[in-house]
Amino acid sequence: MPRKLGKTSDQRRAMLRQQVTDFLDHGKMETTVTRAKEIKPLAEKMITLGKKNDLAAYRQAMSFITREDVCKKLFKEIAPDYAERNGGYTRIIRTGVRRGDAAETAILELVK
């Protein structure tokens, strides 16, 4: 059963799309462990599409990623780095708890 993250399905989809876009743009992000676990498979799927490097894959990625410049970066810079790698493009590193609400935080980053 998917994690609801305290949001309605359309809010959740919008948030995940935005976070995957920001993550691919910057290469790493700090968020809660739960969100990181939701973002990871989506980001990996986008990188896999980037590795296909055809028009259909580009359009599919564009329908999920919210900014065209990030989609171009994915296909031109990020995906070619992982050409020889079969999956496992991201890692989650736990960083402890947040002071305000004691939520467990983590850094999600692209594996070099």
Image (cartoon, helix red, strand yellow):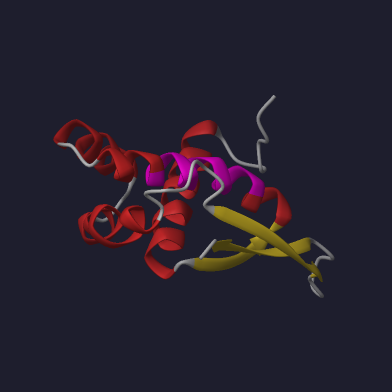
Q: Nearer the viewer, residue 103 or 36?
A: 36
Of all residues, the one furthest to the left in this rendering is: 55
Q: Is residue 41 magenta?
A: yes
Residue at 37 percent across and 59 percent down: it is 81
The image shows residue 65 at horizontal and vertical percentages of 33, 48
Q: Nearer the viewer, residue 84 or 108?
A: 84
Residue at 41 percent across and 59 percent down: it is 24
The tally of labels here is 0
Q: Tell whether 26 sits left or right of 109.
A: left
The image shows residue 75 at horizontal and vertical percentages of 26, 52
Q: Nearer the viewer, residue 23 or 73?
A: 73
Residue at 55 percent across and 41 percent down: it is 41
In the rendered image, the vertical position of residue 54 relative to residue 23, given as above or below: above
The image shows residue 77 at horizontal and vertical percentages of 29, 62
Query: Which portion, as a residue range, is magenta?
Result: 37-47
Q: Tell whether 8 sits left or right of 22.
A: right
**Most frequent secondary structure within the magenta stretch:** helix
Of all residues, the one furthest to the top in this rendering is: 1
The image shows residue 54 at horizontal and vertical percentages of 18, 37
In the rendered image, the vertical position of residue 50 relative to residue 30, given as above or below: above
In the rendered image, the vertical position of residue 85 relative to residue 94, given as above or below: above
| Residue 25 figure quarter | bottom left
In the rendered image, the vertical position of residue 27 relative to residue 42, given as above or below: below
| Residue 21 figure quarter | bottom left
Residue at 30 percent across and 51 percent down: it is 66
Q: Tell whether 83 sits left or right of 63.
A: right
Q: Nearer the viewer, residue 19 or 112?
A: 112
Q: Is residue 97 magenta?
A: no
